[in-house]
Image (spheres, helix red, strand yellow):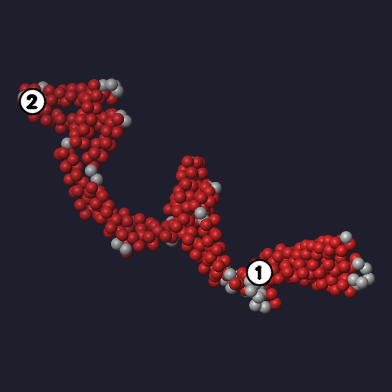
Amino acid sequence: MTLPATFSSATPGDAQRAAELKRVKAQATLVLAGTLTLFVVAKIFLHVHPAFGFVAAFAEAATIGGLADWYAVVALFKRPLGLPIPHTAIIQGNQHRIADKLGEFIEVHFLEAGPVEAKLQQVDFGSFVADWLRDRKRSDDLARFALRLLPEAFSATETSGLMTFITRRLSTQLQSIDLAPLAAGALRAFVEQGRHQGLLDDLLRIVHETLTQKDTMAVIREKIRAELPTLLRLYRADKFLVNRIVASAGTFFEEVRKDPNHPFRAEFDRMVLSFVDRLGSDRSYVDRIDGFKRDLLARPELAELARNIWSNLRSFIDRSASGETQVLRHHLAGMFVAAGETLAGDTELRGEINQGFVAVLRSFIADQKSGVSSFISDQVKAWDMAQLISLIEINIGKDLQYIRFNGALIGGLAGLALYTAEFLLRWL
């Protein structure tokens, strides 16, 4: 905390309060001087009329009351008239004790788990985050800030050896993955969704188109011709057979494609499911897939591909961070805005975010509250008390000065009451 060294360096509000304090102090002093003067005058004219005795009693008690409260107010901040009177300059003399008690008070009454959690529960952190992200300018600034950090993060990853660690860790994880069950599960889901039937339709269409091509038919004809007797070749039976085979196959394919309940489809289901079962349980398939995986991961082309991808990504990030291209920044900003919109419409997610913030902040405050107490105590102990007292006086001194007015009035009324009682007792 930085306190003003003098009133001239205070804020305009402090300067105004200081002037008001000075005015009220002068008024309180005038009241004290007035009661003292009235007391003297009343005592001089006491022989003139008994009423001056009442005036003198009021003025005497008012003067004493005003002096007592002046002493009390001054003793709070400093030594009255500079005299080393015990139990004066209370704030200065108890600076360290006040500092410790203030820190303890803050820790016990303000940073307790119950009040802290209750206050945190009132804050809607999720809505704040959502509103912040939904603002396009803020999201754009956040994207720009993230892009400025990315090149440094890439450089740190490369120079710190983290990239090597990540590569090795990734390779180890890939090697440990059992692909056979994953492949079997994926194929089973593919079959259960009926998507394999569409694949069958595509295969039948491709086979039919292949069979009807002239080159394919010529090859089949040559194969058949080579197997036929010479007599049949003379009657060009090979051409007839090829045409019949292609026509029959085309008719069969068409029937299968048009009939969703065709027996061949059921047979295809059985064949595919049988393959899926073997893929997940047959050791030979498992070993074959694992071998393929190891061979693939060991190929130098894969490492070179990874390096090229990393290099291209690094180049793209550098160009985005330098402003050469705005694609990534706009994309990131759009993602942040979309995340804000999604969060704004998801009450459950906002509630989870709020609970997360509460848990983290509650734990953090619980761990740090003793440190906060010590920090406050150390700060108060390090303050310049003369400056602190000046600051306190200009903020609450005016109210304290009114104690002097009240002291004079209450003291005067008490003195008048006592004098009146004494006067009546003398006449009884």
Residue sitting at x 43%, y 57%: 147
Q: Position of residue 176 (x, y in %)?
A: 23, 47
Q: Is residue 182 visible?
A: yes
Residue sitting at x 53%, y 51%: 115
Q: Is residue 121 depicted above or below 238 in this figure?
A: below
Three-letter code, disc 1: Leu
Along the line of sight, the residue nearer the viewer: 240 or 3: 3
Q: Earlier in the sequence, mark 1 or mark 2?
A: 1
Q: Position of residue 257 (x, y in %)?
A: 28, 25
In this rendering, the label closer to the viewer, 1 or 2? 1
Q: Position of residue 416 (x, y in %)?
A: 83, 63
Where is mark 2, residue-wise? 228
| Neighbours of disc 2 within 10 Å: few (<14), some (14-19), many (20+) | some
Where is mark 1, residue-wise? 76
Q: Is residue 406 left or right of residue 42?
A: left
Asked if marks 1 and 2 touch (Cβ < 8 Å), the reply is: no
Q: Is residue 143 visible?
A: no
* Label 1 SS: helix
Residue sitting at x 39%, y 62%: 152
Query: Disc 1 and disc 2: Cα gap in Å?
Result: 127 Å
Along the line of sight, the residue nearer the viewer: 378 or 162: 378
Along the line of sight, the residue nearer the viewer: 311 or 150: 150
Q: Position of residue 297 (x, y in %)?
A: 22, 50
Of all residues, the one furthest to the left in this rendering is: 230
Three-letter code, disc 2: Leu
Q: Which quadrant of the rendered structure holds the C terminus?
A: bottom right
Q: Is residue 327 depicted above or below 51 in this figure?
A: above
| Neighbours of disc 1 within 10 Å: few (<14), some (14-19), many (20+) | some
